[in-house]
Image (cartoon, grey):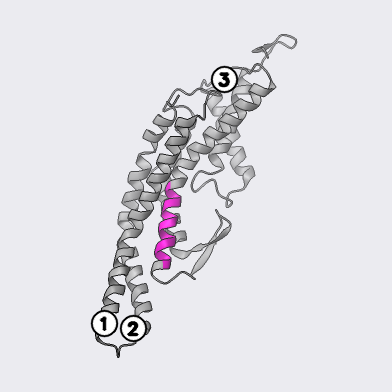
Amino acid sequence: MDLVDKTLNINWTPFWTWLLVSTRLIGVFSIIPAVGTNQIPIFARTSISIVIGVVFVFSGMSAAMPENMVEAAVMLLTEFILGFILGFVPSMIIGAVAVSGQVTTGAIGLGQANMMDPSLGAQVAILARIQSLIAGVVFLLINGHHSVIRAASDAFGSVGVGKFDPNINVVMLLIDRFSHAFELAVSLSAPILVTVLIANFVLGLITRFVSQVNIFIISLPLTIIMGLYITIYTTSGLVEHLIKEFSYLEDVYTVLQTLK
């Protein structure tokens, strides 16, 4: 396929570039935190992707025309994968917060207190939902979505439109981010888990030495009160952790878009 249609004398490069960039942005807005959820209609997200794609094309982005239909399909697929990865990286941080909330909710005895999460379409623990909402708000307040959109515009690397190669290095980077998200979930839930463990140990000693005390009556409300208090007390630390994690997004995108 030539860059210029010799029959109609039409330059298809801007249209092809717009199609690739819009596909990349559709991948971004299909999973990006606070935006890529079922709460926002697919039509709205697609429309935003198309409009931003037009802006990118007018800013000077350009892609090489494919040689055949197979190459065109591969370029479209890799662009969607790149966009999905760009949105998935911050989503892993939100997921780590949700996992932490799920674990701590069960630990303090509120395992049956669930609420609907529209982004997942399923019931989740109430603390997991609340902390996920906090993480989404923090992501938007520190303009994390701006970092993702800038990454989609190749601001942090030199991938080029239609040239992304999802090789083993990209997979290893994602595995590294996943393990880091697991560490984050453990660090966020650790204060409550340790406190509950100590409380249960002390209650066990009381039961051992003062057998007349009905420990089952006081253990559940005590654990819930302690867990909720520590959750509220450590909310500021949760926000600080989130700001720190989201501030690393640009560094991660720089590495991602320079992998060969």
Among numbered discs 1 and 2, the one appearing first in the sequence = 1
- The region drawn magenta spans 93-106
Q: Amino acid at mark 3?
A: Ala
| Location of the C terminus (image quadrant) | top left
Magenta stretch encompasses residue 162: no
Among the 4 quarters of the image, the one containing residue 103:
bottom left
Residue 57: percent from left, percent from top: 56, 24
Residue 152: percent from left, percent from top: 49, 31
Q: Secondary structure at mark 2?
A: helix
Frontmost of labels 3 and 2 is 2
Q: Residue furthest front?
A: 208
Among numbered discs 1 and 3, the one appearing first in the sequence = 3
Q: Amino acid at mark 1?
A: Ile
Magenta stretch encompasses residue 95: yes
Among the 4 quarters of the image, the one containing residue 248:
top left
* Residue on which disc 3 sits: 63
Residue 131 to residue 90: above or below:
below
Q: Is residue 170 left or right of residue 5?
A: left
Q: Is residue 213 left or right of residue 1?
A: left
Q: Secondary structure at mark 1?
A: helix
The Cα atoms of the two marked residues, 1 and 3, are separated by 71 Å
Asked if disc 3 and disc 2 are in contact, CB closer than 8 Å, the reply is: no
Among numbered discs 3 and 2, the one appearing first in the sequence = 3
Residue 244 to residue 227: above or below:
above
Residue drawn at 39 percent across, 67 percent down = 107
Q: Residue furthest bottom?
A: 212
Asked if disc 1 and disc 2 are in contact, CB closer than 8 Å, the reply is: yes
Picture disc at residue 206: 1
**Badge 2: how crowded within 10 Å, few (<14), some, or many (20+)?**
some
